[in-house]
Image (tube, grey):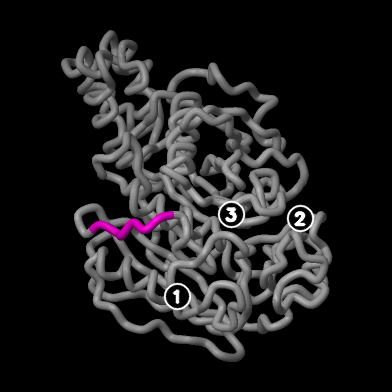
Amino acid sequence: MRAKRFHMVAVLAVVGISCSSNSPSGNEGTGGATSSTGGATSGTGGATVGTGGRTSSTGGATTSTGGSITSTGGSVASTGGTTTGSGGGAGGAASGTGGASSVGAGGATSKTGGAVGGVGGSGTGGAGGTNVGTGGSTVGGTSGANPSAGCGKAPTAITSSQYNKGTTIPITAAGLQRRYVLNVPTNYDNSHPYTLVVTIHARDGNDIQMFNWQYYGLLPQSNNTAIFAAPNGQMNGAPCSGTGVGESGCGWPNPNGQDMALMDAVVAQVEENFCVDTNHIYATGWSYGASMSYEVGCERPLGGTTATWGVRAIAVYSAAQMSGSCKPSTSHPVAYYASHGTHDSVLGYSGGVSLAQNWSNADGCTWQTPTSVTSGAHACTKMAGCKSGYPVEFCSFNGDHTPFPDTGQSAGSWGPAEVWTFFSQF
C-alpha cells in the first residue's frame, strides 16, 4: 500500500434476506430497501431509503456511542507502500520483451532509477530502459509492486467521462451484460502502480450506491492512493439495471459462478486500462456484499492457480456465507478483517465469529474467541501466531446490522479508518 499509514451462520436462504438499504444505518431486518419501516431496529432510519443513507435519523438505534476503546490493530506501518528501493530492478527484469532486452547495462542502470520514481525506465536506462515498456513504469512504483498491463500507457477502453462521476461502465461477463462504477485517483499517474479495492454492495444496494457511500468510506481514507471498482449485482437470474441509489433485491447469488466471472472481468479491464499493483488488490463488502467478498477471498487468493489475479486481503462487515460454499485455503492465505454488531438482527453475530475462525485456521493463527462487546465501546481482537503477513482481526461493536459501526453512517464511525489501517500494513 502506498499510504504512509497505511464469516458461519447456517447457510441462509438468499431469498428473503435483505442485506442493504440506501441508508447506511443499515438495520435491515427483512425490510431493507423494500420496506417502508426500514430494518429490524432502525426506527425511522430505514425511511430514508432513496437518499443514499447520508442523513439517516435514528437508524441503528441500538448502536452505542462506543469507540472509547481504541483498537490496537493496524499500528504496524506499511512496509511496502512507500518504499521504492527495489521496484526498478524487479520491474526492468520482468517487463516482457522490454525487460528482457534491458537486463544488460540499461537494466542495471534502471535499478537506480527505480529509487527515484520512474527516471530509470525511460531516462537513465539507456537503450534498455526505453524498451522496458510496462516494466519501465515499475521503476516509478513501490517496493514489491507488480505492475499491470495498463502501466505506462493511456486507457483505451475507458474514457475520462466514465470514472469518478458515478457513471456505470458496461462490461460482459459469463455471457451477460453487467456493469460497474469506477474511481481513479484525481492525480493519477500511469507510471505508478496503484492499489485496487473491489467494493461489493449489499442486497438492495448497487454500484451507484457504492459511489454515493464513497466505497464504504474508504475513498477519503485512501488519499488518492487507490483505485476503487464497484461491480453491480443481479437478481431473479438477470443483471440489476436500476439507475437510482440502490435497487431492491439486487445481490450476489453467484449462480454457476456468474458473479465471480464479473469480478474477473472487472479486474481484468481495470488492470488493462490503468496502472494497478496486482500484488495489492483487496475486496470488501457488507452483508450480501460481505458474503461475495468472502467468496472472492476463497476462490481468488493472491498466488492461487484458478485465475490470473488474486486478493491480498479482504474486509467484511456483518458477514454470512451466501454466495457459495468455498472454504479458505491453507495453501494460499488471505489476510482477513471483520466487524460485526453483537445485536445484529439480520445476520447473527455468532455466525460472523465462525467465519473469522475459518480464516484464522487457514492463516495459521492461534484462534481465540474475540472479545464480545455488549455495551459501550467496541473492541478489536487480533489473532496471534498467524502466518507472517496474513493477520486476522475481528472487531465487535455494540450495534445492529451496519457497515458503519457505532454511528450507522460513515461520518463519525471508526470503521473506515480501521479497515484502511488494516489494508495499509501490506
Q: Secondary structure at mark 1?
A: helix
Question: Front-most of 366 and 39?
Answer: 39
Residue 179, x across and y down, in percent: 60, 34
Q: CA distance from mark 1 to mark 3?
A: 25 Å
Is residue 302 placed above or below 293 in the rendered structure?
above
For the C terminus, give its image quadrant: bottom left
Q: Secondary structure at mark 2?
A: loop
Please state which amino acid type lies under the numbered disc 1: Gly
Residue 395, x across and y down, in percent: 48, 75
Residue 205, x across and y down, in percent: 67, 53
Report crowding for label 1: few under 14, some 14 to 19, many 20 or more residues within 10 A (C-alpha): many
Specify the quadrant of the image occupied by residue 148: top left
Sequence order check: which comes first, mark 1 or mark 3?
A: 3
Sequence order check: which comes first, mark 1 or mark 2?
A: 2
Residue denoted by label 3: 218
Please state which amino acid type lies under the numbered disc 2: Gly
Q: Residue furthest bottom?
A: 375
The residue located at (59%, 23%) in the rendering is 158
Q: Main secondary structure of the magenta part?
A: loop
Magenta-highlighted residues? 324-329
Report crowding for label 3: few under 14, some 14 to 19, many 20 or more residues within 10 A (C-alpha): many
Is residue 387 placed above or below 345 in the rendered structure?
above
Residue 351 badge: 1
Residue 52 badge: 2
